[in-house]
Image: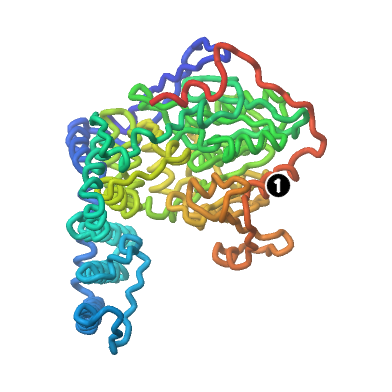
Amino acid sequence: MSDNQVDVVQLPTVSESGQVAQADTYVHEAHYPINPLDMALQNHIAKLTGGISPASVSLAWMDWAMHLATSPGKQMELVGLAQRQAAEWPPFLKKKLLQISQTAGAQSAEPEISEATSDTRFADKAWQQWPYNVMSKAFLQSQDFWEVATSGVRGMTAHHEDVVNFMSRQLLDMVSPSNSPLLNPEVIQASVNSGGKNLASGFVHLLQDLGMEFPHHHEFNEQSDHADRPQYQPGHDVAITPGKVVFRNHLIELIQYTPQTTQVYAEPLLIVPSWIMKYYILDLSHHNSMVRFLVEKGHTVFIISWRNPDKDDRNLGMDDYVEHGLYAALSVVNDATNGRAIHTVGYCLGGTLLAIGAAALARNNGISAVSKPIAQIASVTLLAAQTDFSEPGELGLFIDESQLAMLDALMWKQGYLDGKQMSGSFQLLNSRDLIWSKIMRDYQLGLRTQPNDLMSWNSDTTRLPYRMHSEYLKHLFLHNDLAKGHYEVHGRAIALNDIRVPMFVVGTAKDHVSPWRSVYKIHVLTDTPIEFVLASGGHNAGIVSEPGHAHRTYQYLPESMRNKTYNDPDAWQAEAMTEQGSWWIYWQDWLKHHSDEKQVKAIKPKSDATLGDAPGTYVFEK
């Protein structure tokens, strides 16, 4: 394939009556020449490595080794650290041997050595007993040593330093004594107390997680509750807010929710969730559904439910998601609400798409690239959504030219990135809790964490089209084109500075997917009023933060305390006020303030038996 060769995408649309219309044709330029032989080999390598580029990892370790070899000062620092760690052992061992030899309750004359650690793997008191305290101390010292050894080596690129530091932590986590049932005192004690039933139950759990059938036995029933765990099914347990599917095309279903008040705010809300996961993260159970909260507060709410793509959708690109996703939904909402301005809300990747689409519309005066009037946007709310990707957090570990080439090869044959392949990368970012601690808890202790609606949603994975995912990683994560003003929609560059409507932006304090300081950078990319809120919690739990949820807080800076000049994120956080409770209430007040004071009669969704009730059909696609 030459540089000038193009791919043609046939994207059929479906009318509101459900009839397939004539396919629209869009042309996309190829990113770079593709040699099928190269892609075939790299595809096999990617399958063996789980999508990790061996070249990228090797280059990072070579960068570290070569610069460490020419850094005698750093080497002396490591020697000094090793000596200090070695010096801790004689008093430590002496104290422990005295404790063993002395009678119960006798006090040692030696000064106490702190054994406190924030590592939850060794939090159990049994780890403070001989000989387990020796193993845990040795492991934690090794962990501290390699943290220093892989950080601050002069001359290394920042990306390679992050990769080496991350890889060293992964390798150490693999050999942690807490992972071995023969070295973990918690597992040993549980085996003694239960007569080994915990290991039998753990074996059952392993078979179940591998999708294998295993006959139930009464001896395991007390330990294994996997078969009895509740299932959270869309339309039954979650995604239960009443509504109708009012539009469907090849890419989206648009749901309009039934109003719960006779009068509503004149401006409707359109929610654009991420297509990395199913939309009902924002419509979970009755008590924590953001959709239900908004409807009950008097808002007319629409939400996009993305179709789960397959191999035939390999050539769907970001332009298609803008045109047939965001713009199609905006147009339908505009028609359904008689042309009223629309409050738009985007979550995660959906927020990035919303920012892109809003900037393109602002540039074109509300006209799409195919010369179709869309709608007037009243405001933009971004929930844990990045627009500047220069500091993407630990996700940046998987972003460089070599790594993206490997991911391209992984997706090339199947035409998409599978949800399991994608979730594997997220699990690596927090392998201590999501992999190793799970293995110890589920398979060695024989326990099961009782699932909830959020956990059930998290396991309901989706696929990502080959072209879209490649474009997203290359133009946003790798080259940061959106922040630089180089990102193109249908061949024309856009600038976020063209967005002039008010913005409400939410970051979450413990977010490893969209770090809040990265989200905060919207302040330097736009010249419009921004209300920024920092919510407690992580990428998902910080957003699903309903009123009444215990221990939830959020930070904001009152208008009276704001400077006319730019505040960096740390200065903002130092000045911000902290409120107990849900940021949803603060946001809803902001929406109210930016809506017409006069409410209007509620508009019920159109009833169409062909399209059906919420949650629609796309949400069930596996």
401 to 278, vertically: above or below: below
Viewer-proximal residue among 207 and 59: 207
Residue furthest bottom as drawn = 109
Viewer-proximal residue among 24 and 505: 505
**Residue 401 x/y as whole percent:** 30, 47
Under circle 1, the secondary element is helix
Task: Tell me the crowding category of disc 1: few under 14, some 14 to 19, or many 20 or more residues within 10 angstroms, Cα based.
Answer: some
User: To which quarter of the image does residue 256 belong?
Assistant: top right
Q: How many marks?
A: 1
**Quick check: 450 left or right of 401?**
right
Q: Which residue is drawn at 45% across and 36% down?
A: 457
Q: Residue at x 22, y 52 (%)?
A: 191
The color scheme shown is rainbow
Residue 155 seen by the camera: no
Quadrant in which the C terminus is drawn? top left
Residue 560 seen by the camera: yes
33 to 80, vertically: above or below: above
Viewer-proximal residue among 224 and 313: 224
**Residue 148 x/y as whole percent:** 29, 71
**Residue 555 x/y as whole percent:** 61, 58
**Residue 141 x/y as whole percent:** 25, 71
Quadrant in which the N terminus is drawn? top left
**Quick check: 531 left or right of 484?**
right
Dot 1 amino acid type: Trp
Question: Which residue, given by chain and number where applicable, does mark 1 sit on?
Answer: 590
Residue furthest right as drawn = 598
